[in-house]
Amino acid sequence: MHLSLTTGGLVQENRTKIFWGSRFSSDLVGNAYGYRIHNEELLKAAERIADISEEGEDAVIIVSPEFYKERVPGKVNWLYTMFEGTTLPKLYQRSIQKADYLLAPSTWVKGLLEKYFDKDKIFVVNHGISKEFTYKRRFYPPSRTPFRYLWIGAPNPRKGWEELIVVWREIFEKMPDVELYIKTTVLDKVERKGNVILDARNISREDLLKLYHSAHCFVFPTRGEGFGFTLAEAMATGCPCVATYYSGLTDFFSSFVGYPVGYVLGPGRMTFIGATGDERTHDTQMAYPDIEDLAMAMMDVKINYAEALSRGDSGSRQIKKDFTWGKAARKLVDLVETHGGLKNIDVKKKERETKKFVIEMKKSEKKYVMTMCAYNRPDYTKQVLDHLQGCVGIEKYLFIPCVEPGNQEVVDLFKKISFVECKPIFHEKKLGVNENTWYALKSGFELCDFVIHLEDDTVPGRDFLLYMEWARKKYRRDTEVFSVCGYNKIDNKPKEKDNFRVFKNNWFTPWGWGTWIGRWQGMIELYWHDNVETSWDIFMNNYLRRKKNEIRPILSRIQNIGEKGGTFVTPEFHKENQYNPIWVESVELQKEEEFKEIENGIH
């Protein structure tokens, strides 16, 4: 059975007509809180700009696939849904095939759904956050004691309460000036044990807002979210936030607005409520937050609260500007106007089809990701791949080359790769250096929070990957470091003690480099908004100079061989300024050592 919701009153002829259908069992509302709030708020916003009536050719359904048993007949079906694991349950896989289009609340969920559905028929419409979640000015030092950490969520391990309790017991339990407030839904009472408060009451939205306002820090060590409602609500109030940097919340959460926590993907069991009210399980991959990272982030907020408040203010401005129900409704209506309607979809054919869906993309188990951009230089590309094959640790990587069309030799080189797990992306049309680089990094960040990137003329040395892995761990929490680069041009052979030393540099070098997702997203958003005519690496260099650092080795782990075919480089300029006569492959290393940052600071 579906619900028909209408605005009433006069209907303007030029307004888009949409049929609103949803399925919620009244006794399961508590278990479908996110879907219910989403349905109610988006509907109210959509009613202001569209005609919500039974006459609409497009049916918008906001519901879990578990409840999407049958299509709304005779209409184009837009299913707005989500899931929090890396794979969908078989029932969900079959269910979504009944829809004509899928709507996802986040980019991450869209990527998940693309494993099972036509990616060209999946669109992202982010959730909004209600205006009632008002900004609360907090003070440094905190205006009240003790310092309150707040966690809100269902009593489900996916919400990360287990990791939070471990950190609390090891670090915070005996601190006299802190408390942990846990808001969940188990028993209708409030209990205190030491400096931990457990609140399991059913409370109003007004009381929920008061709870956000009372907190100095919101902690959300989730293992996976379709969007991350509570995190976005906390951010809207200006509360400094600590959260796992994974899944749907990465659309709005980064080191610019909060404190991202690292994670490791591992096997886990999702639990969810079925259509009959029974508890279902699904074995999948989940993100397990790094305990040490979580503890350090929580402590960072308390110790450097002025900085935390600054990030909280930035987060509040971002949520209130970009994540409103009005914007969500406008995008939804625009999508229906552009893609929907019976004229664009053969509904009868769709409803006649028997859907026996078995499509499932292989999930790579590789821990690290490396991307590469390739164009029309097969000789250079072959040199890069030959050296890459000799890199120590290459077997741990998933390699994603993004290949421009136009040179079959280059295409064939990537098709024949067998020394590493390789998932090449062969573009049908030329994107150009700027967009191809962005596409490569975006593809890598969908799988990993740190990505290494090569060009078709940047040759890696044998221990390049060891250096990058060391730097990834060393500087993962140092947000003053934007990137790690393997290239450094020197004129004289370094002393033996300098072969494994690195230094900070106020520069950006695009030759054999890597960065973290939050740092990349912050910069690339500025670039795409304001500087699309500028080469992306020039923009990065100009913006980051004297603001952020890159890490470089004294002895280069990268050779630049791009003498020919470059956009701005002549052979003479390349030889004088870019070619490296002294690099790791030209020096005999006496022994392998741990990399170490030199003490005399920025060069």
Image (spheres, rainbow, N blue to C red):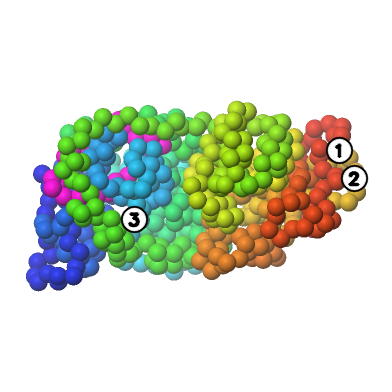
- Identity of the amino acid at label 3? Val
Residue drawn at 26 percent across, 38 percent down: 97
Return the residue at label 3. Answer: 125
Label 3 residue SS? loop
Task: Mark 2: give few (<14), some (14-19) or many (20+) Cα within 10 Å.
Answer: some
Q: Residue 462 carries which label?
A: none
Residue drawn at 69 percent across, 64 percent down: 545
Label 1 residue SS? loop
Residue 184 visible, this orientation:
no
Q: Nearer the viewer, residue 144 or 566?
A: 566
Position above or below: 573 against 461:
below
Magenta-highlighted residues:
66-90
- Is 137 left, or right, of 174 in this rendering? left
Return the residue at label 1. Answer: 587
Return the residue at label 2. Answer: 493
Magenta part, dominant SS: loop
- Identity of the amino acid at label 1? Val
Residue 274 in percent (x, y) is at: 23, 35
Residue drawn at 11 percent across, 58 percent down: 55
- Marks 1 and 2: CB-CB under 8 Å? yes
Q: In which quarter of the image is residue 109?
A: top left
Whichever of labels 1 and 2 marks the residue nearer the N terminus, that label is 2
Task: Mark 1: give few (<14), some (14-19) or many (20+) Cα within 10 Å.
Answer: few
- Is 482 left, or right, of 301 in this rendering? right
- Marks 1 and 3: CB-CB under 8 Å? no
- Identity of the amino acid at label 2? Lys
**Distance CA(mark 1)–CA(mark 2):** 8 Å
Task: Mark 3: give few (<14), some (14-19) or many (20+) Cα within 10 Å.
Answer: many
Residue 531 visible, this orientation:
yes
| Quadrant containing the C terminus in the rendered view | bottom right
**Distance CA(mark 2)–CA(mark 3):** 55 Å
Q: Which of 566 and 387 is in front in this view?
A: 566
